[in-house]
């Protein structure tokens, strides 16, 4: 059961107000549907700077947090629109997670490349979801279902989340570790 969770939206476009964060409330709603007594912290949007994202994640470790959800920064949005910042969530997670499962998605939906990662540091599960609302919703709903089936199977959780995002678009999937 998830008793304490942290939501960390990322992206220069959120930090500067170009894009409104509609994903955090939707993710909060999903987590509360899993456990109505879950304590959820929403961090202010973090700029697309790898060290800042990594430091933000680390600041919640050791605080008895069951889940950290990073929103956005998983793709190549800057390749699609010059108004979107470079994405570093996936590289930040790669740098701090020793045990992880990841899936790369390729498509023509504005996310020419996206990498979803699921792993743990001690008892804290850390996942990322894409920024576009439709993709984030599909990913977190798949997370919920898969987590409720087996919270310890990070590989299956990652696969289910990736398949849910993939179902939103016609994309090629490349499975890794």
Image (cartoon, rainbow, N blue to C red):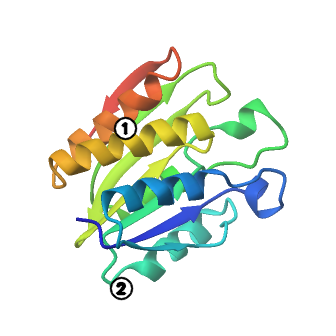
Q: Looking at the rendering, in which quadrant would you find the C terminus?
A: top left
> Which residue occupies 70% across, 48% down?
86
For this orientation, the residue located farthest to the bottom is 63
Q: Quadrant of residue 34?
A: bottom left
In the rendered image of this protein, does residue 52 appear above or below residue 163?
Answer: below
User: What residue sits 67% from the left and 59% below the top?
Assistant: 48
Q: Which mark is residue 63?
A: 2
Q: Residues within 10 Å of mark 2 (few under 14, many from 20)?
A: few
- The image shows residue 132 at horizontal and vertical percentages of 63, 39
Circles 2 and 1, Cβ within 8 Å, touching? The answer is no
**Which quadrant would the N terminus be assigned to in this image?**
bottom left
- In the displayed structure, 51 sits above or below 118; it is below
Q: Could you tell me how far apart the alpha carbons at marks 2 and 1 are, in whole angstroms? A: 26 Å
Left or right of 112, for residue 58: left
Left/right placement of residue 107 relative to residue 85 reads left
Disc 2 is placed on an element classified as loop
Query: Residue at (47%, 72%) from the top-left corner?
Result: 57
Q: Residue at x 83, y 61 (%)?
A: 16
Horizontal arrangement in the rendering, residue 75 relative to residue 66 (left or right): right
Q: Quick check: can you spot residue 103?
A: yes
> Disc 1 marks which residue?
161
Residue 101 placement: quadrant: top left
Q: Position of residue 26 (x, y in %)?
A: 54, 52
Instruction: Tell me the element at label 1.
Output: helix
Q: Alpha-carbon neighbours of circle 1 within 10 Å: few (<14), some, or many (≥20)?
A: many
Q: Position of residue 104 (x, y in %)?
A: 43, 33
- Is residue 94 in sight in this rendering? no
- Seen from the viewer's position, the closer of residues 4 and 157 is 4
Disc on res. 51:
none
């Amino acid at each position: 059961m998830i008793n304490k969770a942290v939501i960390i939206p990322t992206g220069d476009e959120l930090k500067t107000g170009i894009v409104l964060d509609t994903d955090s409330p939707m993710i909060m709603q999903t987590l509360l549907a899993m456990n109505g007594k879950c304590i959820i912290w929403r961090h202010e949007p973090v700029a697309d700077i790898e060290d800042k994202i990594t430091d933000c994640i680390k600041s919640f470790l050791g605080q008895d947090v069951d889940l950290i959800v990073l929103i956005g920064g998983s793709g190549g949005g800057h390749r699609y629109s010059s108004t979107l910042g470079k994405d570093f969530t996936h590289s930040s997670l790669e740098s701090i997670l020793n045990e992880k499962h990841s899936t790369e998605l390729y498509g023509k939906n504005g996310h020419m490349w996206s990498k979803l990662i699921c792993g743990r540091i001690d008892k804290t599960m850390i996942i990322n979801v894409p920024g576009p609302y439709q993709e984030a919703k599909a990913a977190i709903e798949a997370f919920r279902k898969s987590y409720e089936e087996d919270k310890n199977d990070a590989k299956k959780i990652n696969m289910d989340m990736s398949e849910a995002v993939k179902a939103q678009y016609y994309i090629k999937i490349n499975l890794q570790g």
